[in-house]
Image: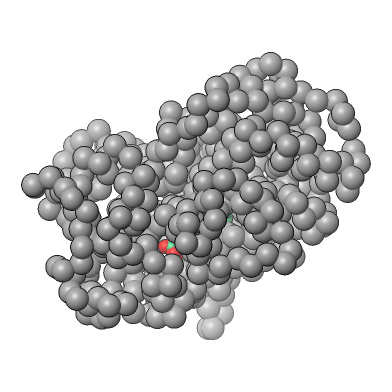
Amino acid sequence: MTTETIPSPPGLPLLGNLREMNRDMPGFLQRTARTTGPVSRVRMGPLSMVLVADPLLVHEMLVKRPQEFAKSWRTTRLLQGHVGDGLLTREGAENRRHRRLVLPSLHTQRIARYGEIMVGESQRLLGSWADGQRIEVVEEMTQLTLRIVGMSLFTVDDDGDEVFAAVHDFVNSLNAYLLSFGLLPGWLPTKTHRWRKASVARMDRLSYELIRRRRDRGGDGGDLLSMLISAKDPEGGPALTDTEIRDELLTMFFAGHETSATALTWACYELGRHPEIADRLRAEVAEVLGERPATMADLPHLPYLGQVVKETLRRWPPGWLFDRTPVADTRLGRHTVKAGQILFFSPYVIHTDPAYWPDPEEFRPERFAPGSEIPREAYLPFGDGPRICVGNRFAEAEIALVLATLVPRVTLEPVSDQPVQLSGQATIRPKGGLRLTVRTRRQGG
Ligand code: HEM
């Protein structure tokens, strides 16, 4: 079967499935996977893309034959104007070289030090909330995780607020650009293009300044920035140019905060809707920690917390849509797919597949209790294979430590009992944000 004969869901002439995708892309892809089949061709106007919803085929692309499937030119082109050539957009040997440079700063031993920042910043956030206050959770969590990633990986301190504001603007402009699909040539002075130019110029100035100051100061700051600056090539020269360091810095800011913020937003949403789960979590935290703050070393002793984190990432995987493209014509399952064809897969669609997850819409942390069988191919919140997320341990620890700090001190009550609608952009989020009411608790109460 060739790409042309892969079944398609019904669509309109010319527009194809564009209208439904614009209205509710996550829901549309979910329905397509259930009704059209595990491999289907969806059409967005003139663009045709193949949705691979069968976890075994996705596993084949990511884990068994990764050298045959690169990230697509579309994603790479869309990202490059913002983040340059960082880990997200590099392929092959260059991707592996950069991963080797970045990964040590994210190893479990190294991130123990980041735990204090994660907890400290969560306490700071708690201190800014008043009893009865209605908060916009997406916004609060985005500010929190932005500060955590900036302080942990780049020790942004003195000029923190300016850098955080610039990154926030930069990521919003990147999201707007992704949504525009880059359909218009970059030189056209559209609002999105002008925004991109300004936000990138501002980030360039700040990141080169950060690199210059760290070089001048010398020594090992114990963070990713120091490691990138001091990395040596086999001849003893610098392994990375300043432009390469700038690209990794922006890549990490982009990949490393909105994703975690979205996961935390969903965790708050589910805990608000399931007080019994929040109570059980609170009881576990109280038993293990008493009244002291959590540390990274406590996490293995908080198994239910770990299950809540994993179930949040199953039910609402923030990184919900990715793509690959065959580097040469090849077979995938029963299909022949052509070089350059965009194949996309969605952890959200796979994580809610009833063939793998009974009652997939239900939030049940005990799915991940010790002894339960997790279908490996059907659980991929961080991707899989050689391009698996480099920040997976960092993110899991961050979500757990933030929850372990918030849950004993506040209850976050839903403002309405309406289920949220979804907005599938770079991450999958509640459409229009998520408002919750803060109820402060006496600790131990
Ligand atoms: C809940 C939080 C996070 C989620 C759900 C997530 C998800 C993912 C996924 C699914 C991929 C693979 C994409 C693909 O295969 O095409 C990925 C890649 C990546 N992630 Fe994460 N991520 C999270 C947090 C982080 C953090 C905290 C960092 C950095 C500190 C980070 C940095 C990266 C980078 C640099 C890549 C590209 C790796 C490569 O292509 O070699 N992520 N992430």
- Taking 175 as reference, is 224 left or right? right
Residue located at (50% from left, 31% from top): 419
**Can I make out residue 205 in this image?**
no
Residue farthest to the bottom, as pictured: 234
Q: Which residue is drawn at 59% across and 35% down?
A: 269
Q: Can residue 290 be seen in this view?
A: yes
Identify which residue is drawn at 71% across, 40% down: 277
Identify whether 235 is placed above or below 440. below
The single residue placed furthest to the top in the displayed view is: 132
Residue 385 shown left or right of residue 220 in the figure: left
Q: Quadrant of residue 101?
A: bottom right
| x, y percent for residue 262 | 53, 42
Quadrant where the image shows the C terminus: top right
Question: Residue 78 or 297: which is nearer the viewer?
Answer: 297
- Quadrant the N terminus occupies: bottom left
Residue in the foreground of this view, choosing between 43 and 181 = 43
Indicate the quadrant where residue 425 lies. Answer: top left
* Residue positioned 70% across, 33% down in the render: 275
Q: Nearer the viewer, residue 111 or 202?
A: 111
Q: Count the marks: how many?
A: 0
Residue 189 percent coordinates (x, y): 19, 37
Above or below, 352 relative to 118: below
Above/below status of 442 relative to 309 = above
Q: In this view, does 145 lie to the left or right of 208?
A: right
Q: Quadrant of residue 342?
A: bottom left
Colour scheme shown: one colour
The percent coordinates of residue 99 (x first, y second) are: 52, 70
Q: Is residue 259 left or right of residue 197?
A: right
